[in-house]
Image (tube, rainbow, N blue to C red):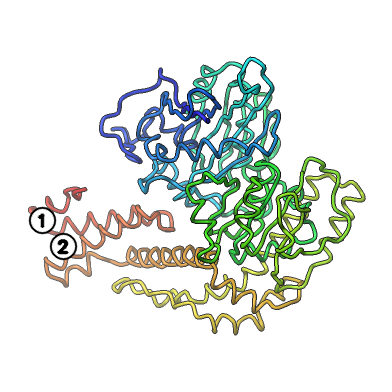
Amino acid sequence: KDTLRVVGVPPSTRVSVPGRGHGAARLRGDGRAPLLPWDRFSAWLHCICVVGFDLELGQAVEVSGVPKTLWSDMEKLKTSICYLSFPDSNSGCLGDTQFCFRFRQGSNRKSSQGCFLETADRDAPPCLKREQGHYYGYVYFRQVRDKSLKRGYFQKSLVLISKLPYVTFFHCLLKIMAPEYFEKQEPCLEAACNDMDRWPAPHPGRILTLPIMGVVIKVRIPTCYDKPGTSQLVQSGDSLVSIVLPTIHEVDLFRCFHPVFFHIQMLWELVLLGEALVVMAPSPAESSDTVLALVSCISPLRYCSDFRPYFTIHDSEFKEYTTRTQAPPSVILGVTNPFFAKTLQHWPHIIRIGDMKQKGEQPTKQMKVKKLKNLKTLDSKPGVYTAYKPYLSKDEEIIKQLQKGVQQKRPSAAQNAILRRYFLELTQSFIIPLERYVASLMPLQKSICPWKSPPQLRPFNQQDFMKTLEKAGPQLTSRLKGDWIGLYRCFLKSPNFDGWFRSRRKEMTQKLEALHLEALCEEDLQQRIQKHTEVEAVDLVLKLKDKLTQAEREQLPLQPGTLPKLRSHIEALIRTLPEDLQGILHKPPTP
């Protein structure tokens, strides 16, 4: 059975922090950010796990160097983590294998990373915001022959657990850490944790230099203000920098989609609409890469349903996701166990992926969509098994362009860039009419009165939106023909639309709050208060204090100088009141 050990910050840096709960970081007296042990480490990782296979011990957990606050919500999930950290026995993964998985958070408590990442989250693009209800597990698995062991093989995984979807970055990190760990064991992990506890927080837009075990990684985390499809990290001439990562999260789309090359546009539709999809692959590496490629193909739109890059029969959601008593949920599953070929036979869309190791062998002839009844085992031929009929006509241009690249032996990176640009432009063509319509729901700025509540957004009306498509639809930016109206109708019922609209509505509501606060700050409040009673003056002060608290808590998009101006207004108003009231109003609010 699998055994799980958890390793964290070295014992030399451990301290007892009385009363310190999740997210309870405190400022020092000089106002600087806290530098408690684990704070910087926790901004990047939740913990580091070592999963081994032991015939005698069975499942056991040894916690070394991780505070209970970091591991307690994992305790119930240790069995899932053990199974998810190992390939299925049929995968035959000899040597070193890297993959990732994703699983539900065990409790609803706020993560200790929150104190560092709330500001960073605001500036991150949708696909890179930290996960609220899920963790990622990034795995480096080694299986080699060892006659000294009863099983005949050495099998062990080093696993990084994090809320951050930085797939490329964490895989790069594991390539540095895991070989060292397998050779030198725990001391080198302690050194790595020590290095990470000195890293800066993962703030979007900043170029970060991250030393780890004698190697220096240079990365830049994208922001939501970046132009989509561009990288702003240039190669460094710094001799101290060992690795420059051009991306922290993107997988190679062209490599992942080559087994189902001719169906990329249909797969984009299925992901956009939040359809139930299962990817059947020969190994966790192919499974997880393909699921991540599917999720990212609708970028910059965030995929809002559940997805599991690697899913096993031991997962806590196995019964929930494989039941036949109700329709399959909106989820993308990546599986390798042949058992799923039978268990998920009732799913509407199944993608069978072959071995991706032969990168040069790209498909050169058309593959038909296969009927679901033809999928009987995991050994079935690669392809897409579905009865789905796409809303849009097939784009032959992108197929020809990529086929030409294969014939001319175009570099894989260039093929990947072409395909990523294609998906980006397709998604933007689809989302621009929605963005334009939603922007029209915003009240005019002249309707904002400082002495009334901020105006409300007008509700989203599906019929009104559909009317705008005739003159301002995707035909303005896309060459594709087909039933765009039908695609929009289906999308408006999907979790992806719900998640996108909730996010846009929140942004626009905060913008209205910010405009209202800025208008209020431009008023001569002292002159106005002279016409009101003392009770009304106190009421205004309390309301302004609430506005200030809300602006700081929600980080409203205010013009520079607005908050200092609001504080000076509040202070000036308080000075006009009697001394006893001044003392009461100057007291900090009770937490």
Can residue 296 be seen at all in this image of the molecule? yes
Is 337 on the left-hand or right-hand side of 557? right
Q: Secondary structure at mark 2?
A: helix
Is the Cβ of the residue at disc 2 closer than 8 Å to that at disc 1? Answer: yes
Question: Residue 24: x, y in percent?
Answer: 32, 39
The answer to which of 523 and 212 lies nearer the viewer is 212
Q: Amino acid under label 2? A: Val
Quickly name the residue at label 1: 581
Q: Position of residue 375 (x, y in %)?
A: 72, 58
The residue carrying mark 2 is 538
Mark 2 or mark 1: name the one nearer the start of the chain: 2
- Give the camera-side residue of 206 and 221: 221
Going by the picture, which residue comes out furthest to the right? 408
Q: Nearer the viewer, residue 78 or 137?
A: 78
Q: Quadrant of residue 273?
A: bottom right
Q: Tell me if residue 227 can be seen.
A: no
On the picture, is 177 further left or further right than 412? Answer: left
Q: Position of residue 313 (x, y in %)?
A: 55, 46
Residue 553 at x, y = what percent?
A: 35, 53
Residue 444 in the figure: left or right of residue 589: right
| Element carrying mark 1 | helix
- Give the Cα distance between marks 2 and 1: 8 Å
Q: Label 1 amino acid?
A: Leu
